[in-house]
Image (cartoon, rainbow, N blue to C red):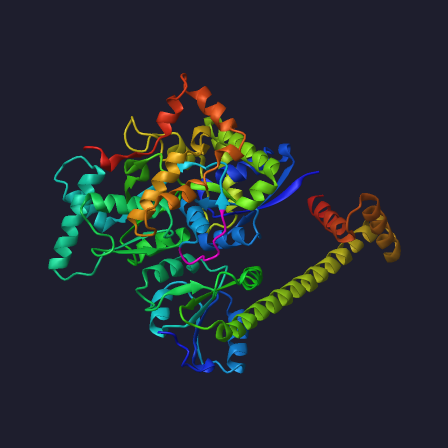
Amino acid sequence: MSRTLRVGYIPLIDAALLHVAKAKGFAEARHLDLDLVRETSWANIRDKLSVGIFDAAHMLAPAAIAATLGLGLGHLQVPLVAPVALGLDGNALTFSRPLYDAIVGRLDGAPLTPRATANALALIIAQRRAAAASTLTLAHVFPFSSHHYQLRLWLKAGGIDPDVDLRLVVVPPPFMVQALASGHVDGFCVGAPWNTIACDAEVGRILHHGSAIVRNCPEKILALRADFAEREAETVAGLAAAIQEASGWCAAQGNREELAAILTLAGSSPEDLPRISPALLGQLLDRPADGPSSPPALRLDPAATRLRPSQAEWLFRQMAAAHQLGASDELEARVRSVYRPDLGNDLGNDLANNEGNEPGSAFERDQIIEILSEKD
Amino acid sequence: MPETSLHGEELRIAVIDANPIRAAILEEGLRDAGYRHILRVEDTSGVLERIGALAPDVILIDLESPSRDVLEQMFEMSRVVARPVAMFVDRSDTAMINAAIDAGVSAYIVDGLKRERVKPILDMTIGRFNAFARLKEELQFAKSQLEDRKSIDRAKILVMKAKAIPEEQAYALMRKVAMNEGRKIADIARAIITAAELL
């Protein structure tokens, strides 16, 4: 008899592994019937998972940590855990065409590195202040999101204080392009496919992929309530295995066309998620994002589903830097408690190690690299 | 500063609901209960400015609204609303929180408001949301029944013509097929119509 699981998701390309696990029968093979429920906000995902309307969810990794600690406005404080990640990277910084041109124009032909562009933005902000022009507004998707932290890291590299020198706001991903077109925001950090859509609509230009700021950046995880995971260990292991099998399937370039069809169906209405083409997926998943040696813009491969304690620790530091929590060892231990790769069956581990020839190579490849902390 | 000096009817309430009918039903209920300062926000753009202007004590928002994430960030920054805001009143009241989320609504409440003052508002909101959902369900049911009957009538005529049999016999035949296949007679009817369109 199969077990039905209600799983919430936000219509983004990185919900792909859930859709594939269902559509390709990887969940069914483990006697799991996934009832995938589309949601409109990360707050809904958090609340419906916390009160038990959802059994599992596609969730921003830091949002799961915040819910566990009772941070933010959730105030429910329900411990959550994750057995697998649903991918790595995938965000990009997109700016309005005038601001993009202004930033690039100030580089004087220097290479377009995140540090150089952040410095250029700092100059523009100073100039605007002198001219008493309006404060620039940049958008991300949720207070507890990698998007928010990537923006802050980039701004910091240019000596820009995001709490003083400009306005950071939240805009739901489906409204990003419109917010940029109307001049409501001057730029944003959002996940796929919204950056590409802004470019195609000639509203904005991608300045940097997220991986140019933080490589192998934690993104969405498969989140569950800790008590549920404890009660239904077998179900959770099965679901994690189905996700990992889906990631193996997604990694095969031959499956692009079918993946595009699955995601387009999942989006169902065009205003929420426009048609996902195989070409767009190829651009995101198969081609290096920034130059030949860089990783693709979005990673859904098996190694990218592996959770590592270092990722939770990195997120903890970003949350502290954004003044969302005070750093303490006790807190850090609770943050780490969300990442529970031991709840999965570690199939991803095997797949990842099979890809690299020597043990450990996959680990190094998937470590978080803060590009801006390196010397340019 | 606790706001205990305010009378109940002076609480400022913002209702953010993409469904104008449901918002109107809720507003009506709140007005009947004596609340006078109610702002309905239906659009998603400009939510921040309008809420900032009202400085509400209680914000009721439907869970379909993507503006929830916008609001949460805004309250954290505390730039628009001067006082701290929390979701619901206190986190120990899980029954209330569950009932609200189940009904499809969430509430943000400024700090310092007493539970007794907010509870009637939340109770009414949950009640109206649930009643609205029931109404919608009943309407949906009535609609699908009407459609079923239309399909069955159309299919019946097709069968009568094709087999040159009277109405009762055509209906009996469709019912027999439905029973044999373990499907609804309306499903069989729709299959007959689709087949007839193809042939």
Q: Is residue A231 magenta?
A: no
Residue B65 vs A14, above or below: the answer is below
Q: Residue at x 30, y 59 (%)?
A: A184
Give the left or right position of residue A34, taking residue B180 as reference: left
Pick out the residue farthest to the top: A357
Placement of the C terminus of chain A among the 4 image quadrants: top left
**Quadrant of the drawing holding the N terminus of chain A:** top right
Toward the viewer: A244 or A324? Answer: A324
Q: Which residues are magenta?
A: A72-79
Which image quadrant for residue B87?
bottom left
Residue A238: image location, x then y, percent: 59, 34
Q: Residue at x 35, y 55 (%)?
A: A170
Q: Nearer the viewer, residue B189 or B154?
A: B189
Residue A340 screen position, x and y as percent:
48, 37
Residue A227 appears anywhere in the view: yes
Q: Would you say residue A78 sits in the magenta stretch?
A: yes
Q: Nearer the viewer, residue A315 or B161?
A: A315
Q: Is residue A30 left or right of B199 when viewed as pictured?
A: left
Q: Is residue A203 above or below residue A216?
A: below
Q: Position of residue B71 (x, y in %)?
A: 39, 61
Q: Can the viewer see residue A258 in this picture?
A: no
Q: Position of residue A174 (x, y in %)?
A: 41, 52
Count of picture labels: 0
